[in-house]
Amino acid sequence: MFQITKRDELPTWQGVLIRIGSILAGVLLASFIIAILGFDPVKTFAALIGGSFGSSSALINTVTIAIPLAITALGLAIAFRMKFWNIGGEGQIIMGCVFATFVSHNMPASTPGVVLILLMGVAGFLGGAIWALIPGLFRVYLRTNETLFTLMMNYIALCIVQYLHFVLWRDPAAKGFPKIKAIQEQAHLPMLFGVHIGFIVAIVLGVLVFLLIRKTKLGFEIRVVGESAPTANYAGINVRQVMLTGVILSGGIVGLAGMVKLAGAVYTLSPSITGNAGFTAIVIAWLSNLSAPIMLVVSVLIAALEQGSQVIQIKLNVPSAVAAVIQGLILMSALGGEFFLRYRIVRRKREQSKSQKGDA
Amino acid sequence: MDTSFVIATFIASAIAYSVSLLLGTLGELLTERAGHVNLGVEGMMLMGGACGYVTAVKTDNLLLALFAAAAGAALGALLYAILTVTLRANQNVSGLALTTFGAGLANTLGSTVAKSNTPDHITAFFSFHPFSLGDVQNPILRFLNVSLLSHDVFVYASILLAVFLSWFLFKTKEGLSLRMVGENPAAADASGVNVTRIKYMYILIGGMLCGLGGLYIPLVLQRTWHADITAGKGWIVVALVIFVRWHPIKAIGGAFVFGALSIVGMTIQQFTQISSLVIFNQYIMVMYPYVLTIIVLVITYARKKAWRGPSSVGNSYFREER
């Protein structure tokens, strides 16, 4: 006779052990599927690791992919803390890029780089914040389900950028090829150690978000609202105001992630600019238990999978989509593993079941 | 240009386009009726599409292909069910993980048949239109013939399925149990309904329907496979379920409206005076289904007495907590 009961707090080392164990289980499952698909799992994983960390150029690529993922996850996590399901990261990234591109296109070429970059950063923040604030206002005042609203906002943003790409902002100089004009050259983010300085932005934001949640009054209020809105209300917290502030910060940081990717890596706004970062970051935030420092690390690991996927395609002729299979499986087993953090399976004999009450 | 013919062809292509949306919507609707919102529809449609299409190309057997599509997508749904029903993981994140996994698996499998076309026997089956009037002269009959009557068996079968599911959901005991689990699993449990069985069963059936919807895209609409062939239809489905307010019959109309809005921009391009207006631009028009969904969503939640869908959606059920 098995029975499932809720656990009390686990010692930290046990929690870490369970998490590592479930991720390893995911790797094993993924190896199994890779083998079924007819590829060599050991070689595939070796090539994945080598292709993402093995050389300095690989490492640079990995970090470059990780930057927007990390910033997006940091932003989304603020909303998740309030149990505001912001799954509109895709749309907020796009709108951040649209606003930043607009600024770059409309500033004179004589604008100094620093000024232009700062203005674009502000614009990126605004773009993302507005895109998150719209569902936020409806959630706060009309109780509209924000999960579905933010999801829809992704597609509206995608349609807008397609319209800009194919019609409104189409660059006539591109000779019939649909393309938006690249941002001004002095707006490109400077490089440090071969990577654009977006990685510093990510680290600084990681520290700031950590401090915001742990050390400030707003962070405390955000956590209380997330635990229980009625309790927060009873404690005299202005739930609406806290929630809207949190949503603006969340969307704004995600928009900034878009601006950083635009000015640091791709330089041109296009419909495929997000590279799915808005969805991947949700998973990163969740896997990291919404902890800012862990998010930075997990982003690099997920980015390594994406970077390595190119290498396995070239070197081993393994389709790059296999990396998505691995990512999905590791995620699922990490999610499944959380069960063992929260519950435990108690085995008890029938005759004892009455005297023992869930405590063994 | 013969305007009525253009309109009739447009309606016909909108119907063909909306079949996969309808099947996916019916699947996700059953899942949500059991209290689970599965954001993995896109992944399941891709898995179903890839498994079914690979089988179709290798065997040229439609039944095997349909079976493979349902089985492939059901595998994805099973993973989701284990995570969210048994292990009580967060539904949103589990669904997103399923989409990542499903898309990866589908694109890996599908790359083996990327240059193939739908084989002859299956193409022949789908070019058979049971209600077609043939070559008619009467303009009204011709309009009806082109727009509504010249479709394959699959189209009419999926509409019948929607009707059947309405009857099932609202007129049978099993349908009542399903709705009860979605509304109040604790009450259902207390009245002797096996909550876990119902949840697993309808998450799996829901996945199968998504898989069949996914198969229709490479098999009939595109007649070949390429990566990410569903192109976001799985996400439209999530919107559609709200748009039709969890009702199978309304899903027929809803899927048609969304299908029509998705392709109307291209038809309108033939009329240059209209399409030069921004609001009728094809890239702007594809936005309307999502705007429409938001409006429906806002109205649904703003009305005090309105039903907001199965109330246990999103929460996992733990007997000891009831």
Image (tube, rainbow, N blue to C red):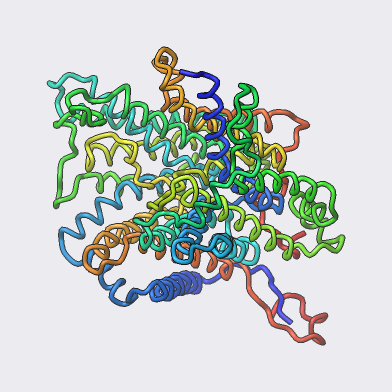
Report the quarter where the N terminus of chain B lies.
top left
Compared with A178, B85 (above or below) is: below
Left or right placement of residue B149 versus residue A271 in this view: right
Compared with A142, B88 (above or below) is: below
Which quadrant of the figure has residue B57?
A: bottom left
Residue for point 62% across, 48% down: B153
Which quadrant of the figure has residue B163?
A: top right
Pinpoint residue A34: horizontal percent, then vertical percent: 39, 72
Left or right placement of residue A40 versus residue B121 in this view: left
Residue for point 70% across, 42% down: B246
Compared with A24, B117 (above or below) is: above
Residue for point 33% across, 61% down: A301
Pinpoint residue B260: horizontal percent, then vertical percent: 54, 31
Please tell me which residue lies in front, B242 or A112: B242
Please tell me which residue lies in front, A279 or B209: B209
How many tags in the picture?
A: 0
- Residue B45 in view: yes
Pinpoint residue A306: horizontal percent, then vertical percent: 31, 57
